Image (cartoon, grey):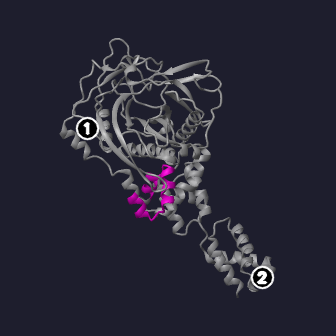
Amino acid sequence: MAKDALMDYDKAIELFEPVLGFEVHVELNTKTKMFCGCANEFGSGANTNTCPTCLGLPGGLPQVNHKAIESSIRLGLALGCGIAESSRFARKNYFYPDTSKNFQTSQYDEPIAHDGQVTVELESGRQVTILIERAHMEEDAGKLTHAGATGRIQGADYSLVDYNRGGVPLVEIVTRMIEGTDADAPEVGKTYVAHIRELVKALGVSNARMEEGNVRCDANVSLRPRGSDVLGTRTETKNVNSLRSVERAVRYEIQRQAAILDAGGTITQETRHWHEDTGTTSAGRPKSDADDYRYFPEPDLVPVAPSREWVEELRATLPEPPAERRARLRESWGFTSLEMQDVVNADLLDVVEATVVEGASAASARKWWTGEIARIANARGEAATTLITPLYVSELVALIENGELTDRLARQVLEGVIDGEGSPAEVVEKRGLKVVSDDGALIAAIDEALAAQPDVLQKIRDGKVQAAGAVIGAVMKAMKGQADAARVRELVLERAAQ
């Protein structure tokens, strides 16, 4: 595959104005699929969660999942959308091997939610309002696995299809054109998708695990020359499934398209594949317009007509908006913008809040979750939230603040808890890790260390206080690290002055 020519990003922004659009697909966490009773589960054996209905076999008739409609309405309301008094499903006709029915049951001209907006805040503090054209219900497609050296469709020997995901409830959130982002365009994309992910988690309508495909983004990018009102030809980078990748994909397309346009070329309207390993996009298929899909009303499903009373009941269940929640917690915890951003970026806001509720200080909760726990999680290739509960973290913090553990000992206790040895208190007891707080035992060890290092004792008496480090180190070794170094230092200076 030939390498694309890229223009320097700053030069590209100087010459061209990026125009963006995003289609975010949110898998709903209902127990069953959108139109049948098959389990909606991730990780089941291939093609085990299937039936005649979701496979499109003769005689299988769809029935709409009531919970999926409820979740879709709640999500639409949270996006500031109007909820249609009547919406209907349509058949979107196209052939693709992971769509066994040869059409996708979706919504086209009559979506359940329409005309909303969200405002996102960039790291610079700049706020960007993004208009939502619609949020419509549909079913997911199956999953293709390409067998070959690269694992990609290009050059694959053959492909395998798992239809477990086919028929899983989706809400597709479609923005209107996003203009005026300029150099911030990649960050706007990342921040917007992060906002959607955070919103659906707060609503409880999706597991929102991007690594499992629960939230996927199609990023539309076009460029127009500075000062022009004529829209450029857009490309659509499909199924980008991490926040970092959304940002990188938008940046790459801006640089790639700018190089083509500057050289006098034209942009092909097409889908693009994102390659995480190389940080590049590649051509997919020519992009179809709505007419090419030959939409027509789904004859086996009646329109969805939620009562206004039900819509208002669902509106009353909406949680605190994520942005307002972050602002409230940041003020309550006394965090700087950077500290709060670290917690949010690490997807640890919920567990930090839960740890504070259990009694830990916000600063200590942030320190342990974003520090040592995150380090262990990264080393093990697991999510930090699966390793330890907020209750146990709060108990660990309490042992430190009570003087029963040093940070060094606490790290050992943490490892024991994660390895399943029990609560922090139980690990301390089993491993004998409690801090030695008996001044008598510490003084005995200090006197022994001073007697063994008379030259150091003299240096301390001569005012070279930094020399006490050698004695402190010897005492900590004798105590097997189970002493408070600050208290040892106090006692060393006291004994040396006598």
Outermost top residue: 58
For the N terminus, give its image quadrant.
Answer: top right
Looking at the picture, tell me which residue is in the foreground, 4 or 92. Answer: 4
Q: Quadrant of residue 256?
A: top right
x then y, percent, for residue 279: 60, 37
> Which quarter shows the C terminus?
bottom right
Instruction: Examine the structure image and report whether residue 333 is included in the region drawn in magenta.
Output: yes
Residue 423 drawn above or below residue 459: above
Can you give x and y, in whole percent of width and height, for residue 176 in the image? 38, 38
| Residue situated furthest bottom in the rendering | 498
Residue 73 is covered by the magenta coloring: no
Residue sitting at the far right? 455
- The kind of secondary structure the magenta stretch mainly shows is helix
The residue labelled by disc 1 is: 83
Q: Residue at x 27, y 18 (%)?
A: 299
Disc nearest the viewer among 1 and 2: 1
Q: Which image quarter: residue 404?
A: bottom right
| 463 left or right, relative to 236 | right
Q: Which residues are magenta?
A: 327-355
Give the amino acid at mark 2.
Answer: Lys
Determine the residue positioned at 52% across, 48% down.
183
User: In this orientation, does residue 349 appear?
Assistant: yes
Helix, strand or loop for disc 2: helix
Q: Is residue 28 visible?
A: no
Q: Is residue 403 above or below residue 416?
A: below
Residue 459 circle label: 2
